[in-house]
Image (cartoon, rainbow, N blue to C red):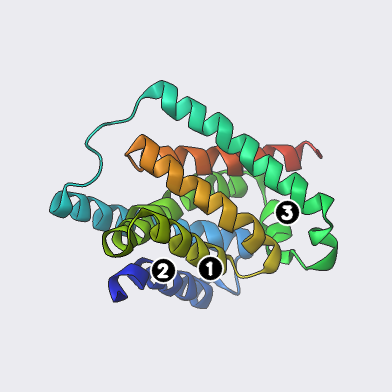
Amino acid sequence: MISTVTPFLLHLCISQMVVMIFGSHCDTAEMTAITAVLAVPIATFLYHREIQRYQDRERRKGEKKKLVFAVVLGIAVSQGLTFLLNLIGVTRQFSNETQEALLGAKLWVQILGSGIFAPIAEEVLFRGLTYQRMKRMTGTIWATILSSALFAAYHGNPIQMMYAFPMALFLCVVYEKCDTITGPVAVHMAANLTAVIMNCAGV
């Protein structure tokens, strides 16, 4: 059971180390980007070692049509969740300072951090490692629910948690359908980059 939360703890340790070293010099978005950049090689190494050990993923490299469909659907799900949260007034009831700080950073930091490196790190850690390990112990349904709940809790504030949980459920489904980590990574990147672009456009 400990192995299922190890990826979460790894990311937490890296983020705390980044805060201690760069906290007085960088803003939230920059520290998020640095954390992701540092986490990606470690997470990728652990993921590929696990794949080699269990031989339970990456058997196919993914079908392009399926991947494109997942990305388009992922953007729709992401924007739908955002619209729903705004519609029911969640954003008026809870603080969303973290998200505002991320979307208020320099554009290149948003693109590299939130748009590229964070999705890679989070998908490898939460879907590639945490979800996959839970699945071996509990089966697909419970692994999907539990890993998604952990992913949501990790985001730390009510608004992001209410968005992250259903999005994580969707990403687990994408991982199963694509049978490669490329699927959820691509969807996560597309969703985040769409949010960055729409924020810059003032939509």
The answer to the question of whether label 1 and label 3 lie on touching residues, with beta carbons closer than 8 A, is no
Q: Position of residue 93 (x, y in %)?
A: 83, 67
In the image, what residue type sits under mark 2?
Phe
Q: Position of residue 115 (x, y in %)?
A: 55, 44
In the image, what residue type sits under mark 3?
Gly
The residue identified by callout 3 is: 104
For the residues marked 2 and 1, what is the alpha-carbon distance in whole angstroms?
A: 8 Å
Residue ID at (80%, 59%): 91
Residue in the foreground of this view, choosing between 105 and 147: 147
The answer to the question of whether label 2 and label 1 lie on touching residues, with beta carbons closer than 8 A, is yes
Q: Position of residue 140 (x, y in %)?
A: 36, 54
Residue ID at (32%, 63%): 138
Badge count: 3
Earlier sequence position, callout 1 versus callout 3: 3
The residue identified by callout 2 is: 8
Q: Locate residue 28 relative to residue 89 in the image: left or right.
A: left
Q: Locate residue 57 relative to residue 152 in the image: left or right.
A: left
Residue 94 visible in image: yes
The residue identified by callout 1 is: 154
In the image, what residue type sits under mark 1?
Tyr
Earlier sequence position, callout 2 versus callout 3: 2
Residue 126 visible in image: no
* Figure check: 47 above or below 138: above
Residue ID at (66%, 60%): 162
Earlier sequence position, callout 2 versus callout 1: 2
For the residues marked 1 and 3, what is the alpha-carbon distance in whole angstroms?
A: 21 Å
- Of helix, strand and loop, which one carries label 1? helix
